[in-house]
Image: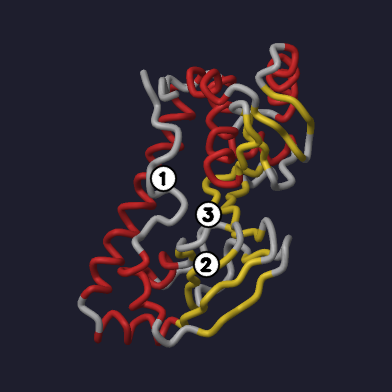
Amino acid sequence: MAINPISKNRFAGVPEALSRPLFVAARPRDLKAGEVFAAGDDGDGCYLLDRGLLKVTVTSSWGEERTIAILGPGAVVGELSMIDGRPRSASVVALNDCLLQFTSREAFAKSMATHPEAYQALVAMLAFRLRQADEVLAATAFLTVKGRVARALVELAELVGMSSGAGQIVLHEKISLADLAAMAGVARENVSRVMSEWRRRNLITGSAPYYCLNDIAALRREIGDERD
C-alpha cells in the first residue's frame, strides 16, 4: 500500500489569506530554540508562526515521546483549545529561534464574529489536523521500520533540505537519532541500525546532527512513493 509521505499542506496547513483574519489583533512573540509550550497548559490563546520551525510532540505516561508534526511558517498552533476550551493537547517545541503572532482567546472569538471567512479557516485547520492524524496512523499501521524512518527523512528534506548538487540534499537543522525515532515512532536503536545500513549503501552520509541524503528516490521507494 502506498503511503503519502507528507500532505501538500503539511507545513502551512491553512492558506495565509484564511488564517490572517484570526490574527488581526495579534501581538508578536519571540520563542527561542528549545523553548516549549507544554501539553496541559491553559489554552489562553493561539499562535501563527511567521518564522522558524516548531515540533509538535505528545508524551506517554511512561515518558516515551512521539513527534506528530513539524511545522513551518504559516502554521497555526493552539487552535484546538480555542474551540473546546480545554488545556493544550500537545507540547510545541521551537527547533530554532521563532517569531510568532499571538492572539488571545477573546480576540480569537471576536475575529470569528466579525470575519465570516474565519469560519472557513477554522474548518480548514480542523481538516488539516485530521489529515495529519490519518497520515501518522497509516504510516504506523502499514509501513515497515525502514519505511517509517524514510518517511521522517523525506519529511525533513521537504522542510529543511537544501540541494547541494548531484541529487544530494543536506539537512540544515540539527537532527538527532532521538528526533528521528520520535518522528518515525520506532525505537532509537532501530533507527540507528537502519541509518547504519543506509550509510553502507551510500543512501545517506554524515551523522547526527547533520545528514546528507544522497538518494532521495530510494528513500521514497521505501515508503511506496515512486516520484523522482
Comparing labels 1 and 3, the label whose residue is closer to the camera: 3
Residues at marks 1 and 3, CA–CA distance in whole angstroms: 11 Å
Residue corresponding to mark 1: 132
Direction from residue 123 to residue 11 in the image, left or right? right
Q: Residue at x 41, y 45 (%)?
A: 132
Q: Secondary structure at mark 1?
A: helix
Q: Amino acid at mark 2?
A: Leu
Direction from residue 194 to residue 136 in the image, left or right? left
Question: Which residue lies most toward the left here?
Answer: 116
Sequence-first disc among 1 and 3 = 3
Residue corresponding to mark 3: 71
Sequence-first disc among 3 and 2 = 2
- Residue 116 vs 62, above or below: the answer is below
Residues at marks 3 and 2, CA–CA distance in whole angstroms: 8 Å
Which residue is at the front of the view, 158 or 222?
158
* Contact, mark 3 vs mark 2 (Cβ under 8 Å): yes
Q: Amino acid at mark 3?
A: Leu
Sequence-first disc among 1 and 2 = 2
Residue 101: percent from left, percent from top: 52, 77
